[in-house]
Image (cartoon, grey):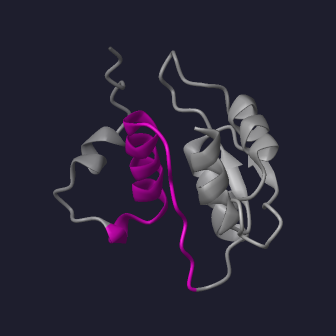
Amino acid sequence: AAARLSAAASASRVAVAVASSHPKATPAEEVARAGAEAGGAPGAGAPPPPWRTAASMLEALEVAAAATPPPQLVLCCGSVFVAAEMREALARAEPELFDAADWVFEASRGEPHLVM
């Protein structure tokens, strides 16, 4: 996992760790610590980006977008839970990016998350 964190972060201006709402999610602080310890990707030639933590997917999206000059590209990596929650946050922030019939609008109406 550390190698994947290192490779993804080495091309970034900032790396933001955030935990999903799943009860077994790794705390954001642990993810950030592991990413910082992994450093940059071997041979990348650039120092690794600073790691930050966020309390929510929306905050993570805002921090990443603020650190990224246009044209903005924000990469979300993690579990299916992280990906789904990030889609929900993105749909709340920029609904025009999604088709009106997308499931993400049903999920972002305050319905409880499915926890297995």
The answer to whether residue 59 is visible is no
Q: Residue at x 62, y 46 (%)?
A: 3
Location of residue 37 by image quarter: top right
Q: Position of residue 58 (x, y in %)?
A: 57, 50
Number of labelled discs? 0
Vertical relation: 54 (above or below) 19: below
Quadrant placement of the C terminus: top left
Q: Name the main secondary structure of what is drawn in magenta.
A: helix
Vertical relation: 88 (above or below) 99: above
Q: Position of residue 81 (x, y in %)?
A: 41, 34
Between 84 and 76, the one lying in front of the other is: 76
Between 69 and 55, the one lying in front of the other is: 69
Quadrant placement of the N terminus: top right
Q: Residue at x 29, y 48 (%)?
A: 104
**Range drawn in magenta:** 71-97
Q: Residue lying farthest left? A: 101
Q: Position of residue 73 (x, y in %)?
A: 54, 73
Report the side of 36 relative to 2 (left or right). right
Report the side of 87 relative to 105 (left or right). right
In the image, residue 83 lies in the stretch drawn in magenta: yes
Q: Residue lying farthest bottom? A: 70
Q: Residue at x 34, y 71 (%)?
A: 96
Report the side of 19 relative to 30 (left or right). left
Q: Residue at x 61, y 25 (%)?
A: 26
The answer to whether residue 97 is visible is yes
Between 11 and 108, the one lying in front of the other is: 11
Vertical relation: 104 (above or below) 67: above
Q: Position of residue 103 (x, y in %)?
A: 22, 47
Location of residue 33 by image quarter: top right
Between 27 and 92, the one lying in front of the other is: 27
In the image, residue 61 lies in the stretch drawn in magenta: no
